[in-house]
Every structure is written in C-alpha cells, then in structure tokens.
Image (cartoon, rainbow, N blue to C red):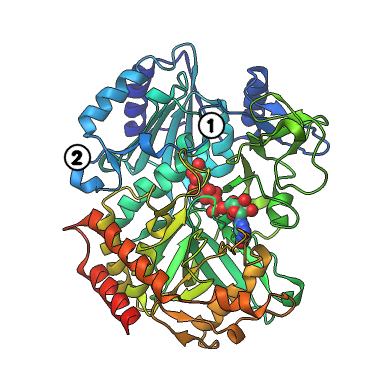
Amino acid sequence: MTKNQLVMTWLEEMMALTKPDNVVWIDGSEAQLELLRQQSIADGEILKLDQEKLPGCYLHNTAHNDVARVEHRTFICSKHKKDAGPTNNWMAPAQAYEKVGKLFDGAMTGRTMYVIPFIMGPVGSPFSKVGIELSDSIYVVLNMAIMTRVGQCAIDQLGDSSDFVKCLHARKEIDEENRYIMHFPEDNTIWSVNSGYGGNVLLSKKCFALRIASFQGKNEGWLAEHMLILGLENPQGEVKYIAAAFPSACGKTNLAMLIPPEILKGYKVWTIGDDIAWLRIGEDGRLWAINPEAGFFGVAPGTSTKTNPNALATVQSDTIFTNVVLKDDNTVWWEGMDGEVPAHGIDWKGNEWTPASGTPGAHPNSRFTAPAKKCPCISPEWENPQGVPISALVFGGRRAKTAPLVYQAYDWAHGVFVGATMASETTAAASGAVGVVRRDPMAMLPFCGYHMGDYFAHWLEMGENIPNAPKIFHVNWFRLDQNGKFMWPGFGDNMRVLNWIIDRCDGKADAQETAIGYLPKAVDLNMEGLNLPAETVAELLIVDKAVWTAEVASQKEFFKTFEGHLPAEILKQLESLEARLDK
Ligand code: GTP
Ligand code: SPV
Ligand code: MN
C-alpha cells in the first residue's frame, strides 16, 4: 500500500518482534471492514445486534479486569525523567523498550497483525497528522475506522514523509500485572500491551492526540487539549465557537450536543468535537481549533432523550457498544436510558441480569463508538481544514462545593491559573476510587506528555502570541445541596450559562468583580422558566471566603509538586488571589 521506506522498515521490525502469522493492511474500504466484522462475530469478539432496530450496530464486552484507562500503568518514556515531570509515571526509553519488548516478543504468533494507517484531523488539513497502528485486535480496527480516517487516505497524506506516529498494540493475555501503556514522545512511538479497553488501545485517542500531540504542540507552538468544541448559533444566525475542558466523564459529550430549553429555542448548538481539540494561532491572530477525531467514544450510562437526545440519535446506527446490557430483543440498554428498565437481560459481564440483581447491568464506564457524521447536530464546519475560530475557552470540573456555577478569568494569565488549579471528583473513566477530589489541571493531568510545569509555561507563552485571544471561563454543573442532590439542572439548561459566556465575549453581559474573577449576578443569567428558588441561585453564585481560603491552601500544596519548575506567573496569580480574598 505504500512505498514509504521508513514505514516499511518499521513494519518489518515490528513483525520480527511480534511474529504474526499474517499481516493485513487496512485500506478503509467498507468491503474489507464488513469481512472483518464477520470474522469478529465468528471469533465471538463482537455480537451483531438487531439490524432492523439498530442497523450496523454491534456489542462487545471487555475482560472484567479491563474496563477503563489505567493511569498507574501509563508511562511517559522521555530520555530524561525531569521531562516527564512529577505527575507522570516515567521509565527510561531503553529500559521500557526492553521490558515491554519482551512482552511483545512473539505476542502475535498464531494471530493476524492489522496495519491501520490513520489521519488525525480532516483529510488534507495542514493541521492534520498521520499515525499507523499495528494491532492484533479486530475490535481495535473497527473502532479506529469510526474514530479516525483510516486507510489509503492516510498513506497518501503521509507520502514519503517520516512524520508519523508509530503505534503498536497487542492484546496478549489481558494480564493486569503486565499491562503497559508506554509513550516515547521523542520517538513518536506508542506501545500498548495486555489491554483491550478503548483508551488503552485506540492509540489515536488519548495516547497520540493528547500525550504525544501535547509534546509536539509544545515544540511546534500549538496546543493539544482535552476539550470539546461547539458552535453556538444565536437567533440572528451568528455562530460563535467555544472549546471546553472537563475531566473524563464530566460532561464534554453532553455539552457538545446540547439542546437548549424551550425558552431559548432560537439558539442552537453545533458539535465540532466532543473530547479533543488541537488549537493553533491563525493568521488573523485568533485561536483556531480542529477536532482531530472522526467519531465519539462516549459514556453510555446517563445518556437518554432527556439528557442527550443528539447522542442517542447518533448511536441508532453504525455504532459499537462496549460493556452495556444486552436485552432479550437483541438491542441494548444502560442505566439512565429512557423507557422501562428491562425485566431481564445479559449484563456487561455476560451474566443473566434483572433489576433485582443489585448490580449495574452496564459498566459505569460502558461506552458507544459512533461516527461523528451521524450526529444530528454535527456542524457544517466540523471538517473545515482550517478549523473554527474560538471565542471562549472554558474549564470545569465536578465539584460538590467551592466552585460557583460560572465565572470569568480577569485575563489570559489569570485564566491559565484558573485552568492550572482545576479540581474534580474522580470518575469511572479511570481505574481506582471514584468521587475523590483531585487536582486535574486543564483536565490534562492523565494526558500531558511532558512536564506539567512546562505545560503551564507553554500556555502562558501561547497567550502572549495570540493578539486576539479567547476569553477564559470556569464552570461547575455539579454543585450538591445538603441532601446530595444536584443544585443546577444542567444538560440543556447549561445553555443559559453559555449565553452569558458569549455575551461576555461580545461585551454585552454584566458581571460583578469578585476575588476569584467576574461572576454573573443572578439577574445577568436568563433563568426564565427554570423555577429555581432565589436562594439556590444565590448559593450557585456564591464565593465563600472561608471555603476559598481553604481552597487556596490546597492549591498551594498542589503547586509544591512542581517546586523549582513552576512559572513565576502562576505563583504570582496565587498570591494575588490570596490578597484579594484577604481584602
Ligand atoms: P469522557 O468521554 O470520559 O471524556 O467524558 P465526557 O466529559 O464527555 O462526559 P459525558 O458528557 O459523557 O458525561 C459523563 C456523565 O456526566 C454522564 O453520566 C452524564 O449524564 C453526566 N452529565 C453530563 N452533563 C451533566 C450536567 O450538566 N449535569 C449533571 N448533573 N450531569 C451531567
Ligand atoms: C476519557 O477517559 O477521557 C475518555 C475515554 O474520553 S478514553 O478513550 O478511555 O480515554
Ligand atoms: Mn475524554
């Protein structure tokens, strides 16, 4: 399929290492994908769902010990430990190649190696990048064909260039103790072994488009971020673009596909991307974003016609479901879906399941893989090779207390500080405890491919180079009341907050200056038709001095992690916040 000698040499080396019985190039054709689906069904890897109700849809269950990203087994293998920084696991490249190389030795014997060339970003875009994943899993091939542009188009785009990311994946025994997700940023290389779960094996996604790309972005003057991108159209038909970073399972897909409440029906949200943004400074001095992906790998539980009708519509065809409930009528179900809870089904572990089973039928991190072009609200601009111009950047997390519904940073440097001090309660998207507050700067803690101190410096420097920089905001949809109930309705009603954000960018909305930034007063937000008690609104917009003083202390503690390697500007911002709170 290619005359690129560098590709062929690398492929031969990886074949010599993993020793597959066969090698199959993925050309991107529907005919080849269909043959692979049939093979995968025959192997018992995927199950064909009811093709009348869910045409082109399949179900896959992972191993029970392989349901989420594994941060403790994910490494940045830069030559020098200091370049990985204090928040990443590090292994020396030579040691990593040797240690994991042993696991790959003969790993594909008796199996087929699939060669998956893929493009991240629109075909032909100057901002796109090429990768090639070698994997022994058809599930990976089928998912990559949804999540990226695969096949000959990638080979053509690469030509004889050496600029491609070399990705190697083998399932092996799905052995947790020997699971490794290794990144070699200086070699443009990713090695993943002993997993079959999305984030660990669809190497285009977090591994390339964030960990490797963030390193490339630092060197090349751009940003790779864990951000959705949406276009907000007002009743006059003008569209403004917003990119927002929330940690895993904190609402990116939902916000990207939002449907406004009835009262705001003149407004519309268009989806550009739901998880990753690559951001560059345009010739016009604005920040421009592309979505490097071509599909959504979204959280299933909680997705319903009430919360996210656009996502639900998207997954009615050509979708792969992972770890959800198989209903008796050969369709799927998950907790939080509309309609009746099925009386009986097969749970994600393959066991008989009824509502009385006492366990969730779908894994909390169960997912759908669906083509972006199937989304009813996909933006006409989503494949624009130049991307879209960003008016506002938004940071947010899951915080029961502390963070108000929304506030605006004073300026870019303050906005970088707001992003750097982000915190959120952990979710099921990664293995480990759920609901623990941790600092997650820019929602990139698990995804930054280099020293986070340098990452903050890169953000600050980017701001100096953007003459017409987006305004920066912080949101929190997840405030809880004394009874542990969400105080803010969220979902479609988040449109009320987005409108304030865009109006602030246009100089049309009012705000009050507080110690943490500009906050809307209750009257500045359109709350019509919500029937939220005034006390609740007040509570959502409060900046409590005692709570924030404790927050500053915790931020200070966190920044000690980066001692000696934190931009002076960040500490200056912390001191200014402290001083403002003391006033
Ligand atoms: P990743 O794909 O892991 O990066 O997640 P994500 O950030 O795209 O999160 P997603 O939109 O899939 O939402 C995760 C969970 O949060 C789902 O169960 C949603 O129903 C829930 N959620 C999303 N938005 C809101 C909101 O505004 N309010 C509340 N209460 N829950 C929300
Ligand atoms: C996330 O965890 O942020 C995801 C899913 O978007 S994964 O592909 O597993 O990273
Ligand atoms: Mn994500």
Image coordinates of residue 40 in percent, x first then y, are: 63, 23
Label 1 to label 2: alpha-carbon separation: 29 Å
Question: In this rendering, is residue 507 above or below 290?
Answer: below
Residue at left offset 37%, top offset 66%:
551
Disc on res. 87: none
Residue at left offset 44%, top offset 21%:
175
Q: Could one spot residue 510 in this view of the protein?
A: yes
Residue type at mark 2? Lys
Residue type at mark 1? Val
Q: Are marks 1 and 2 in contact (CB under 8 Å)?
A: no
On-image quarter of the C terminus: bottom left
Residue highlighted by disc 1 = 140
Residue highlighted by disc 2 = 79
Question: In this rendering, is residue 72 above or below 193?
Answer: below
Rendered image quadrant of residue 58: top right
Looking at the image, tell me whether mark 1 or mark 2 is earlier in sequence order: 2
- Return the residue nearer the eye: 112 or 454: 454
Mark 1 and ligand 2: say if the CB distance to the nearest ligand atom is below 8 Å. no
Image coordinates of residue 219 in percent, x first then y, are: 26, 55
Image coordinates of residue 493 in percent, x first then y, are: 66, 69
- Return the residue nearer the eye: 407 or 103: 407
Residue at left offset 63%, top offset 71%:
495
Residue at left offset 19%, top offset 42%:
81
Packing grade of label 2 (10 A; few <14, some 14-19, many >=20) is some
Rendered image quadrant of residue 10: top left
- Return the residue nearer the eye: 578 or 252: 578
